Amino acid sequence: MDSFFKWFLLAFLQYMACLKAVDAQFPRPCTTVEALQTRTCCPLWNGSPCGFSSGRGVCAPHPARDLPKPIDYRVNWPRAFYDSVCTCWGNYDGFDCSQCLPGWRGPQCLQRHHVEKKEITDLTDSERETFLSNLHTAKDVQSDRYMILKSNDTTVDRNYEFQNTSVYNLYVWMHYYSAKSYAGSGNNAAHRGPAFVFWHRVFLLFIEREIRDLTGNQDFYIPYWDWTRTDNCNICTNKYFGGVRQDGRIDSASRFSQWKTICPFQESLGIICLNTNASEAAHLIRNPGKDPVFKTLPTAADVKDAMASQLFDTPPYDTTSKNSFRNKLEGFEIPSDSRRLNSSMHNLVHRYLNGTMSLVPTAANDPIFMLHHSFIDNFIYVAPNSTKLFLGTSTEKIQHMNNHKQLWKETKLPFEWKKPLQNQAQGWWLSAALVGVRGYEERREQDKQIDSLRQKKKERARETSSKTKRDNG
Ligand SMILES: *[C@@H]1O[C@H](CO)[C@@H](O)[C@H](O)[C@H]1NC(C)=O
Ligand SMILES: *[C@@H]1O[C@H](CO)[C@@H](O)[C@H](O)[C@H]1NC(C)=O
Ligand SMILES: *[C@@H]1O[C@H](CO)[C@@H](O)[C@H](O)[C@H]1NC(C)=O
Ligand SMILES: *[C@@H]1O[C@H](CO)[C@@H](O)[C@H](O)[C@H]1NC(C)=O
Ligand SMILES: *[C@@H]1O[C@H](CO)[C@@H](O)[C@H](O)[C@H]1NC(C)=O
Ligand SMILES: *[C@@H]1O[C@H](CO)[C@@H](O)[C@H](O)[C@H]1NC(C)=O
């Protein structure tokens, strides 16, 4: 098998494997004193923890509970907060097993949910209106499922404070919270390494599902912005995400001019976003093309260059990796013909917009972020040999999650897949946990626990039935 494809497949499977079990933070029911004191995050579904009596899942000890308590409490998630969380069975998902895995729908999550994504400018008027109105709803409406962390005072155990958040701001905060460097190192869990692609995929799947649940529009999806079709920010107009004023603010005729940003600082102390008070926070800023160093968007040639890579990622698996599909896609590895300065592909689009989008901690405040990442995500759906096909038809349909459960069932993960991810593996697992996903090791451990629980249940059933037989006989 071609090595790139092999890598792609392994990485993809790794992601699929991880998607299975869920412990997203901070579920509102788990922010109570009781949940924090008992260190248990197993909310009720249909009257029983994790929907156990409905066969949805089980409240199980989290493997990380045996690890030492971390200084940075994102580490060994959710060790700093909870010992037991829900493990969902079948296609059930969510912190309380109330949701379906991405790609599934229906009361028992047994129906395939296949979405074909469109490019934003290809949406019909009514599709665009629905999309934008669902986004505004997410920005305005308080999440009834989650809260965000307000204080980081861990000097006294359980002395945490949580605050309400809108669904959209929850997503902004999650990006901020994961993207900050951790444990004194310059690394972060979501960028500058192999986790980049998968972290952001999970992130988009998360917000898509939250917005579906919030609005009841089960067909909601995040369209993509194909910036190779244009040489300017063609969606920076009031028809889409708002025209830009001379001072970088959004045109007041656009509803996005009223969007307030949260966590607006490039760097702040600690892990907690110091300014989550929306009434004090800043507005969206965009100056597309104004920075003379980053004045153009990436081109189809840049895409072609990235897609020509033979390897998913290469040592040392960071911003200095060479011949790395990931590093080219992320935009630290610059095309060899020097068309670009320090930034290309993913990074260049951020820098080009010169404002909220160009600073990692603030970027997700701008709704263009999700469209940009939806396009970036597309490149890992497209196997390397399909590059030509993709470039040839920019209306290429982008497929959503499909059939991953089957893949997981039928394929055994070779152990080696972990090696290249080593230096970001922890970061990946942790940040994945932030959006409700667990690492492979943890998952395997949990599978064992679940198997043994099921075994016990079966044995008990057998005992009961033979007892019943005896009693009857
Ligand atoms: C990609 O194309 C090359 C040459 O055309 C072929 O040898 C290789 O097997 C293909 N890889 C996959 C994964 O299809
Ligand atoms: C969060 O919102 C709920 C419902 O609107 C309210 O009862 C609660 O007091 C709020 N909590 C905080 C910490 O603001
Ligand atoms: C908590 O936040 C404060 C700033 O408010 C910071 O000084 C401190 O280092 C942070 N503590 C941790 C454990 O992150
Ligand atoms: C947010 O800021 C406003 C204006 O400064 C202030 O009145 C309000 O009390 C703040 N809210 C919180 C929760 O800090
Ligand atoms: C925007 O561009 C200017 C140069 O025109 C640059 O100095 C500034 O750092 C950029 N701002 C952001 C947020 O990228
Ligand atoms: C590129 O990066 C180098 C070092 O990281 C820096 O010194 C230089 O100013 C950067 N150039 C541009 C155009 O940003």
Image (cartoon, rainbow, N blue to C red):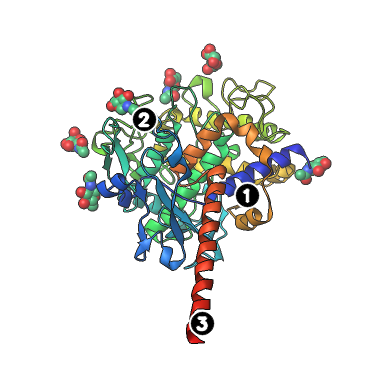
**Disc 1 residue type?**
Thr
> Which residue sits at x=69%, y=22%?
336
Instruction: Indicate if the residue with disc 2 has its beta carbon within 8 Å of ligand 3.
Output: yes
- Disc 3 versus disc 1: nearer the observer: 3
Which comes sooner in the sequence, label 3 or label 1? 1
Q: Nearer the viewer, mark 2 or mark 1?
A: 2
How far across and down, in percent of the image, does residue 274 sit? 29, 30
Instruction: Report helix, strand or loop for mark 1.
Output: loop
Name the mark nearer the viewer: 2 or 3.
3
How far apart, in angstroms, are the residues tagged by discs 2 and 1?
40 Å
For marks 3 and 1, give the CA distance: 67 Å
Q: Name the residue tied to disc 2.
A: 271
339 or 320: nearer the eye?
Answer: 320
**Quadrant (top left, top right, bottom left, bottom right) of the N terminus:** top right
Q: Residues within 10 Å of mark 2 (few under 14, many from 20)?
A: many
> Which one is earlier in the sequence, the residue at label 2 or at label 1?
2
Q: Identify the residue position indicated by label 3 in the image.
A: 470
Mark 2–mark 3 distance (CA, rounded to whole Å): 62 Å
Say which amino acid is labelled 3.
Answer: Arg
- Disc 1 target residue: 395
Name, please, the residue furthest toward the bottom.
473
Task: Write down which quadrant ligand 6 falls in.
Answer: top right
Q: Where residue 420 sits: x, y (%)?
A: 64, 32
Residue beneath the point at 30% across and 32% down: 154
x and y percentages locating residue 170 in the rendered image: 36, 43
Whether residue 125 is visible, yes or no, is yes
